[in-house]
Amino acid sequence: METTAGQLLREARERHGLTQQQLAMRARTSQAAISRIERGLVSPSVAMLAQLLDLMGEELVLEAHAIDYGHDRTLLRENLRLKPAERIRRQAAWANQVRSFQRTVSG
């Protein structure tokens, strides 16, 4: 389950025993602005969220990781070295094999 910016802010604020009004005073904004963020009515920028957390002595840490989709990158590179006509010919041959297999299984 994803955590929203509002949930993250509320949890941090509550950990520090602050009211929305107290956080708003530190941030020089209104309690209503903090409330709108926490309720998900407004989505703060990453910079704003980081600033609000910093006012409570917390650091926002964002990370990005490569996704492994299970593709064989070596095979992809080899296929891309082929001329387009050869790639099409190979794909057509593969499709014919799949159809042949389907007919065999379907009986």
Image (tube, grey):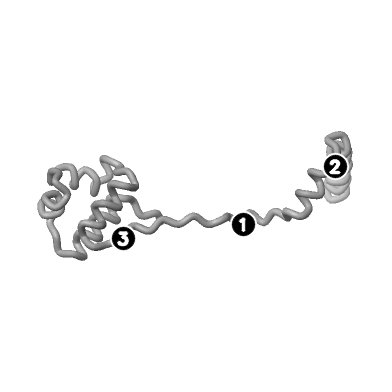
* Residue that numbered label 1 is attached to: 68
Rendered position, 18 above or below 29: below
Which residue corresponds to the image point at 21% horizontal and 60% vertical from the top-left?
56
Q: Amino acid under label 1?
A: Asp
Within the image, what quadrant is residue 14 found in?
A: bottom left
Specify the label residue 82 is tagged with.
Answer: 2
Could you say where residue 87 lies in the image, as x and y percent from the top left? 84, 40
Which residue corresponds to the image point at 89% horizontal and 42% vertical from the top-left?
93
Look at discs 1 and 3 and give the one toward the viewer.
Answer: 3
* Residue that numbered label 3 is attached to: 59
Which residue corresponds to the image point at 86% horizontal and 48% vertical from the top-left?
101
Query: Dot 2, how many residues are within 10 Å of its Cα: few (below 14), some (14-19), or many (20+)?
Result: few
Question: Disc 3 on helix, strand or loop?
Answer: loop
Query: Dot 3, how many residues are within 10 Å of its Cα: few (below 14), some (14-19), or many (20+)?
Result: few
Question: Disc 2 on helix, strand or loop?
Answer: loop
Question: Disc 1 on helix, strand or loop?
Answer: loop
Q: Amino acid under label 2?
A: Leu
